[in-house]
Image (cartoon, rainbow, N blue to C red):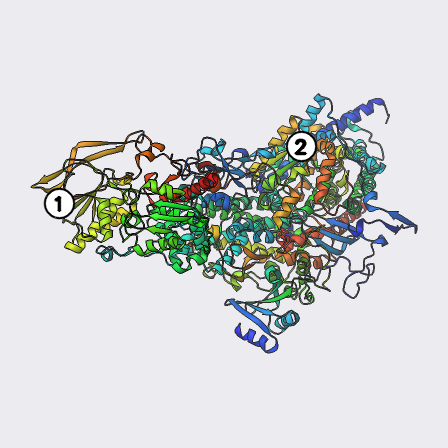
Amino acid sequence: MKLKDILSPFTAWKHVVREPVTIKDPFSREGADRYRGFHKNDIETCIGCGTCEDICQNAAIDMVPVEGIETKDGDSGLRPQIDYGRCCWCALCVDVCTTNSLSLSNHFTWVDEDADVFRFIPGVDKKDWDNEERGWKKPEPNYELYEKERVPMRELHPEERDKSFIEMVKGYSKEEAEREADRCVECGICIATCPAHMGIPEYIKAVREDNIEEGFKKLYETNPLPEICGRICTHKCETVCSVGHTGDPLSIRWLKRYIADQVESEDYKNILGTDGIENNGKKIAIIGSGPSGLSAAHYLALMGYQVKIFEAFDKAGGMMRYGIPEYRLPYDQIDKDINYILSLGVEIQYNTKVGKDVSLADLEKEYDAVFAGTGLHLGRSTRIPGSDHENVYFATDLLREITQGKEIHVAEKIVVIGGGNVAMDITRSLARLQNQKYGKVDVTATSLESEDIMPADREEIVESREEKAIVDPGWGPTSIEIENNKIKGLHVQKCTSVFDEEGRFNPKFDESQTKFFEADMIVESIGQGMDIEYISKDIREQMEFDPRGRIIVDDYFQSGAKWLFVGGDIIQGPDVIHGIANGHRAAIGIDKYLNEKA
Amino acid sequence: MEFSIKNIGYALLTIFIVLNYGLILQGIIRKIGARVGRRYGIRWYQPYIDIIKNYAKRSTITHGVMFYIAPVFRLSGGIGLLLFMPVIFGSEIFSNFSFAGDLVLVLYFQFFGILGMALGAAESGHPYSAIGVSRGLSQVTSFELPLTLGVIAIAMQYQTLNITEIVAAQQGGFLNWTVITNPFAAAAMLIAFLGAMGRSPFDVVLAPQEIPIGPPTEFHSGLLGVLQLNRAIFPVAKLILFMNLLFGGATNWFELIVKTFFIYMWSVFVGVVYPRFRVDQSVRWFLTVPLIIGIIAIILIRF
Amino acid sequence: MNKKRFTINEDRSLFPEKNAEGKIDIDLSSHKYLKLWQGPQHPGITGNMSLELTVLGDEVMDCETHVGYLHRGFEKLMERRKYIQCFPIVCRVAVPEPDFNEYCFASAMEELAGIEVPEMAQWLRTLVLEMSRLQSYLMWIGGQSGAFGSGIIGQWSIYLRDLVLDRFEELTGGRVYHMYQLPGGVRGLLPDGFKQRMEETLLTIEKFMDDIDKVMFNNAVFKKRSVGMGYIDPSWVNKFGITGPNARAAGIPLDVRKDYPYLKYPELDFDVVVGKDSDIYTRADIRRKDLLLSVDLIRQIFAKMPEKGDIKAKTPNVLHWKVPKGETYSRAECTRGEYGYYMVSDGTEYPRRINVRGPSYTHAVALLEKMIINTNIADVAGLMVSLHTYPPEIER
Amino acid sequence: MKEDFKKRTVISPDGKPIEIDPVKDYFSDAKPKVYKPAHPVIEKFANWARANSLWVLGFGTGCGAIEMRPLMTPRFDAYRYGIQWRPTPRQSSVFVISGYLSVKTLKRVVRTYEQMQNPKFVIALGSCTINGGMYWDSYNTINRLDHYLPVDVYVAGCMPRPESLLTGFEELKKIIKEGRGEGANKYAENFDWYKANQKKIIKDWDMPDYNW
Amino acid sequence: MKDIIDRIKTKYTISEVVEQRKNLSFVTVSKEQAISIITFLRDIEGFKHLVLLTAADWIENDKFQLTYLLNNPTEKIDLGVRVFISRENASMESAHHLWEQVATYQRELKEMFGIDFPDSPGVDKPFILEGWEDIPPYRRDFDTKQYSEDTYFPRPGRESNDPAEYMKKKLYPNE
């Protein structure tokens, strides 16, 4: 025992005169800026996707309905409720939150006698820490628990594609598709928005797990035209995709196409197991072989009905074939889907226009029920001065003629009026034709809506510009200048707003700002109208119409004339997926109607 | 010395003052210890609340008769030690029952408490209590040796066994204190004092990390309250004993408080910084250094 | 120093004879022995475990450790959690030192999934591991002196640990459970002014460590209690699977940081601290030096790490991350020795089997049971703390 | 049942064989009593003392125990609020259940709780005691503490910080001062229910129903 | 590493070799030869240190996998020795004579997987669990969630909705 060892411990006593290091007031001590304290949720931003619930390993999060928050497209109306009898404050729910609405405050004290109170809906149940700025937020930068950026779709370069009608989108490879499918958080918000309510998360899961057959079956449960839909669907699902709130939405459409592309025509029946459907002896007539007609035909055929489609043109597909340019939707892909439907025993009678070649009344007699999905084929006119000129065309007519292989008039300078997808289709088709004919492009698309509210898909606008077409939105056409019976161009004025405060169509213009688009051909593409001349007067009397002349149908698309079901673009739309959904629904309705009748 | 009812009143007054002083001292000493650990520590009046709390406990369980008697023994040990010494020198009221041979009796009372505790703790049936008691007895036995040697040396020095007389002999300035006049005896006793106070390195009896917490493990509620009362009185009584024997006693309460506080601080001063000896080490230690000093003291006095 | 193995009584004639297995046949009905339970509620036992001691007088004749009071079935729970969901729970395996769990889990998973962690994240991980080591040692040092009955060191060191926890809170958002080393990277860069505040903390630690040196390591009584006590024979290191400071105190330089370099340790300059006396004091001293080494390493890390960089590698969507089939073992040097995760993946979203190899598993059961025999019951706590065991990692 | 607890015959030191039934002989199995509060004035004073002298049992049952040390040490220094630690259940008045309880620990916790003297209080820390916490699906940890012991205060967090814990103690003080800290009486009143719950999960019940 | 495996191969049969990384390989050996291979590795090849002993349940193959992870502290390499044993009456030769801590591992395996190690000291004593009556919990066929729900009754009042189903209920209940 050394003396030093005995004495040196006494140095500890110097601390007795030093200030204690105690925190004077521990009750109001605050957590660090990053502290993972109690939950906050911005319920306005939150969409109730439930990803937080999925990742929570403690099963601490419940998705519960909240008063005052409605269930709508892209918002389940549910909000996370957190059980502090489970939570471990790992903040993975914050990190994975698709909208970044969830965060943690740096408050950490919650004491109570009752064990049942430790359960609350952040943001709804008011808490002291709701307005606390500090606390855990998702780390930055480059910190993602799932990939926020979309796997880019390989496309033909503008130079490669602007002369021909070859399909420009190449489709995903297996690796790309799996990578894209991996981004899905499986919330299922998209299902409600999809008119056909496709099982989107399920088929994406099938892609991820490389189980194409399973995915393909899933597709056909709700959609008999996956090849077509996989290319030209308006993909409303992607607009509500929860992943899209803080990143790119999933390429749901391309994944659908990926599945369909992987399956060869000859394997269809095998995979779907649709051999040997028993015929139930009932006959259904379908007018029009557009998406709704084909969809209805498909599901009716599966139910055992004998289905016959009456088609006015010499090929099936309706607007899908005659309204959509080939570079977006190659004809062989249309045939792939249609051929499968036909293989189920569906007959098509081409070149038969109901109302002209055969009357609706005849169909009523001959068939147990009739489904009409005749679509919108009539172009609408702007009715501005000069719009009756012969070189003023309707986009639908031109597109149809291009498909039919007819030589159409292609001028050197073209103006397209309209901002929808059809306008873009015709713009780009004309650009290709100009390129073929003149080696240069001079086509301008102008629309009433400004660029941010243009109804056309974003990528359509971008791609149009890539193909050297000019898109100049936000102008309202006033007149077409005609000189010597030749079109000189289009006068437009600035459109300041399209819809009024109540959301009705009521454009306002700034007359001081005008512009003149030079052109020697003008294409109108401001919408289409329906042609229901084939429904004779006596039948119409049984049916109901709304003040704007549209047919009123019930939930099953059954019109006032009980045997007549109407669907597709004339009821909802215009787009393919609504048509498919309507056709499916109507098929169920017809089945129900006939069963009840029997 | 005449015994009268009045003396009982005086004794009770002494006990009351010493109890309060003991409790406050306990609080303050714990605060000082906490300060070395850089914290504030308990409130100075916490020992009071603790005692009230323990008496306010509703239930008490028993392990047998001795279990009840032990705290009483312990407390009587403390009170006995106190009451047979003059607390304030020269004061009629606080001279208590000091008599001619009180030094011997006082030494006995040192031991009395732990013996009573031994009986009760054994009755409680807890192994830690049993181990604690055996440790306590061996340690007390070993530090009694140097302590007694020191006391004998002092008794020989002053030729008396009466504490009052010993104190009287030390009056007249600090140079007359035994600690100056008989440093070896004082050293032996002060080292033994460390053992008597039961602070580390000699806290083998309670030893929270080894046998939590030794003899009183099973005592609770009111029984613990009694032990706590003793814990307030007993150390002060010991302090007064050492003050009387070594530091010239006290002629008033202020002097008593100052002196006893510093004597107490001696054990705290050592206790805070050292870990605990093992029992055998502690016994060995008492039987070496202080024992030798004590023997030297005796020899020096004798010759 | 006294190298002789400690025995209480030189005269062993009073004690019973050992049998052929080297153990004593204990006949409890002989009334010579006392059964003594230490724990689970016992201040001298680290964590919630208990020792069933059979004592003769003051001396322990037989010891059986009882664990399982903290068993939560992590290895089972992880089998029904996705990989990402295992991430928050692994750190709970060893409460006072969660980061090594996070690292071992993440690195095993990254190895199977073939993910390269970005440079910056590796530096941050190294930093967090060293900080964790620091705070764990600070907690231990209080425990070691406390086990011998000196409370004052614990007061200081837990305060110091709290300062480190404050830095942890700033960096990781968690005080005790940091949940910082996510598979693929880490969860945040250093906050503003962190280095400076950490430096202040380190200076405070160094200052207090000087005092602790004087009060604890140069303390006559502490030396008396610890020198020559709890001897571990170097030959036991392999026999019992001893790692870390316990092995280093016996003169065997086992340190995963040097032997199987991981993260950024190859770029840091340090020597393995080795002792030779293999008693409680040496082990304590090794840990003190290791603690100061951590302080030094943190400074080195700050000096060498880049200012900015990616904190996380790109990983598959964690909600359905499938780790390729395979099995691996990843290890790290924690304060107690080699910490490891053995992971078996069957190619699904859920781990097939994860086994946590905590160093306490061997130290606190087989080794402790052997070492405790023939010691004084007063030394049981000190001996146990000197092996630095954490029960939660034994039973998980 | 463990070997130690089985009935057996032992030879006493004086050579006579004695029959012992450890469970019966070594423990008392009298049921707990309900203790009526004293006169309101006395009770109020007593409650003030109880609230200001919280003796916490030093039994770290789960992770939360690690935050006890900061409380005892300079940084948070709970002693200044009248909170002190006792190593023995007999003398403690507050039992802090620091997080999850495995069945094996619960058995010890029940015993320890029963050894504490009335009035006694329980503070439950963390998610685990409320609804199972992160071990909600574990086969070895309980989900709801209030099924086995009466709980006075819950502190949320995983694990709760020392500051929260101090707030919990303050809350407990408030409860005691208001005279609502009657957990021990509640336990005695609903003794059969608590016992049934405990026995349901503690499979090797080798102790008397009540250990004082 | 490769030469070590070659050397083992000269004496024993190894059915599968996986090189996980440069200093970690796994070999599969038969139940009969396992202990003798491990002893060989410990005594001749310098794998003196046992890192861990654990098991994995391959219920679909009706096998338990035992992994003895050995470490060579001088060469700084690890070798995992895998042994597949049948799940039915699972039993394995004890290795407690090789390393002291193995008995502990074997006790745990016996308790958690029900793999018996005859002759291992104290193998039948409960290690972690107390009064366990169900099948050994680490076996794959033991459902811990189910057990917990049946035994520890979670706090009532929790109810969750799946967003997709809830939206269907709210927005298109009939479709």
Which of the labelled discs sits on residue A504, or is there none?
Answer: none
Q: What residue type is disc 2 on? A: Ser
Residue closer to the observer: B118 or A166: A166
Q: Is residue A110 visible?
A: yes
Q: Which residue is mark 2?
A: D53
Q: What residue type is disc 1 on? A: Asp
Q: Residue furthest bottom?
A: E10
Q: What residue appears at the point 20 percent right and 50 percent down from the top-left corner?
A: A430
Residue closer to the observer: B91 or A147: A147
Q: Is residue A7 visible?
A: no
Q: Is residue A226 above or below residue B250?
A: below
The residue carrying pointer 1 sits among few (fewer than 14), some (14 to 19) or many (20 or more) residues within 10 Å by Cα, namely: many
Real-space CA distance between mark 2 and mark 1, rounded to the nearest whole angstrom: 97 Å
Q: What residue appears at the point 74 percent right and 24 percent down from the top-left corner?
A: D38
Side (left or right) of C78 relative to A130 = right
Q: Quadrant of the N terminus of chain A?
A: bottom right
Q: Give the chain of mark 2.
A: D
Q: How far across and how far down the image is residue C198, in percent?
A: 47, 47
**Are dots 2 and 1 in contact, CB under 8 Å?**
no
Q: Give the chain of mark 1.
A: A
Which of the labelled discs sits on residue A520, or is there none?
Answer: 1
User: How many marks do you count on the picture?
Assistant: 2
